[in-house]
Amino acid sequence: MKEGFRQSMNWAHTYSGLLVGWVLFMVFAAGTACYYRDEITFWMKPEQHLAGLALPPAAVVADNAVAALQQRAHNGQRWFITLPSEREPGVRATWARNPVAKGQAEPPPEPGVSRRGRFDSAVLDPATGKPLAATRETRGGEFFYRLHFDLHYMPAIWARWIIGFCAMFMLVAIITGIVTHRRIFADFFTFRPKKGQRSWLDAHNATAVLALPYHIMITYTGLVTLMLMYMPWGPQVTYKGDQAAFTAEVFPASGPRDPKPSGIAAPLTPLAPLVAQAHQRWGEGTLGRITINNPGDAAATITLARKGDQAMSSAQPAMLFNGTTGKLLSEAGEDRGAVITTRSVLYGLHLGRFGDPLLRMLFFVSGLAGCAMVATGLLLWAVKERNRYAKVVAHGGRVGWASRLVDGLNVGAIAGLLIAMPAFFWANRLLPVGMVARGQAEINLFFGVWAGAAITGLAWPTRRMWIVQLGVAAFMFGAIPLLNAFTTTTHLGYSIPAGLWRVAGFDLVCLALGAALAACCWHLLRKDGRKDGRRLPRKHASPQTAAALADAGAAP
């Protein structure tokens, strides 16, 4: 009975992982990069590397940002000001654009202004409030953050349902994997190289158990982050359809949603006294974000929220002020009840913003282990199918289309993505700085390269294709420090002695990834092509059979 249950769990584990494994590999890879999305964005804006941005008091920074927004977004209904941090020295100013009249074209953004949806944003010098000059347009690390749950080229609501569906399958695969492997922890300490299918299973077990608590946490909390979209009925019933009341209680740091202006002009109150109150309550240097609703209107409100890296919970304390008088209207602390606190802690765990450098590095390594777990699981299925088809081909049969399809998808989804990610960084350095819609061009090149690699992988799902694509990925990752040296002055010879670790760290990580992929290529080139069931021994197989098996086996 127990064995029958375990076998049923084995079937569920295999196919729950296989059916969505290619999407999950992308989600893990992009999500892992998100732990350093600020550093990625900084590297992709080399004009800021030597800016030496001064950090005046928070009150001065806030007033400078407000002055800049009054010039650029004086008609905006909502302003967001993200204050500088150790990882992001610039001030991020974001504002909602006024909708244009029906039939009129949207005016293009000004130089130095990036656009997403109905919001424009710019990075400002904290000392002057002026946009940082000659900064190339790029989405930077924000692209990977959005990619891992919003995908691209489709409505975000569709993408989030797709990702949620895949995450649920991932959770099922993890739980059934634990049930299926009776000796899962013992197998973690066992690796048998050069044993074909057994070696792939050992690698899959090791990468799964290495960060098993992380895998469970990141998958479950990923579902929690979008739980209000997947299961909206609780808030709808509790708040009787009053979305504004629900949002104000659960997300106080963003201030009132969809505030209605009064139509009466009124000057905005100075921010310095408000910032002083926040520092008195939370401590110096803890203010993270300022949200201003209806600026220039008598119904203006100002919300000050604490930095998101101060605690594990994503629900940071916030203070709501009247925007014209500066009077404190309400205050939300960290203790907001068990339900909101639980959800906020789980959300904060998924984001990992609270982590110090060592903890973020551990999260990053665990994310890489998750990528390896998904990839080895996909390849393990291909190896098992290849061994099964060895007997079929030996007796005159043909390799099934499903096996070849999985082989091709493995090449395109795994090796293709490993080419597309460094191609995104190469595009950042090689595209003209003043190019129109440059940020979108980088993204288009990312998907174009990935599509090209995926098509060639599907057309020729062979082991040689693995070698070619992994070799290209190794070169593109490994050459990024050279690319940076030829296109900027902040190469490793400068960034390391100068202590510019955000740039040096990015170069070194890319170099390490390139070396790891080069080692994979070297290993594949050394293999004689007869292992893992790719070919039968000559005395048992005709040349035609051996050639057919060679074409069937695309797992490296």
Image (cartoon, rainbow, N blue to C red):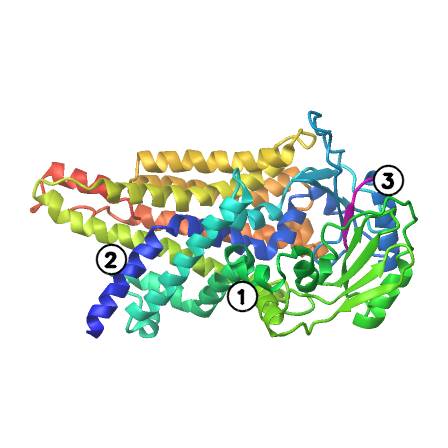
The quarter holding residue 409 reads top left
Question: Label 3 vs label 2: CA separation?
Answer: 64 Å
Query: How many C-alpha atoms fall within 10 Å of the one at disc 3: few (<14), some, or many (≥20)?
Result: few
Q: In this view, does 434 lie above or below 394?
A: above
Pick whichever of labels 3 and 2 is earlier in the sequence: 3
Q: What residue type is labelled 2?
A: Gln
What residue is disc 3 on?
71
Number of disc labels? 3
Query: How many C-alpha atoms fall within 10 Å of the one at disc 2: few (<14), some, or many (≥20)?
Result: many
User: Observer-nearest residue: 28 or 87?
Assistant: 28
Pick whichever of labels 3 and 1 is earlier in the sequence: 3
Using the image, tell me which numbered label, if any, was put on residue 362.
1
The residue depicted at 79 percent of the width and 51 percent of the height is 293
Is residue 82 part of the magenta span, yes or no? yes
The residue depicted at 12 percent of the width and 36 percent of the height is 544
Q: Is mark 3 on a helix, strand or loop?
A: helix
What residue is disc 2 on?
197
The residue depicted at 72 percent of the width and 47 percent of the height is 49
Q: Is residue 130 visible?
A: yes
Horizontal placement of 227 versus 104: left or right? left
Q: What residue type is labelled 3?
A: Gln
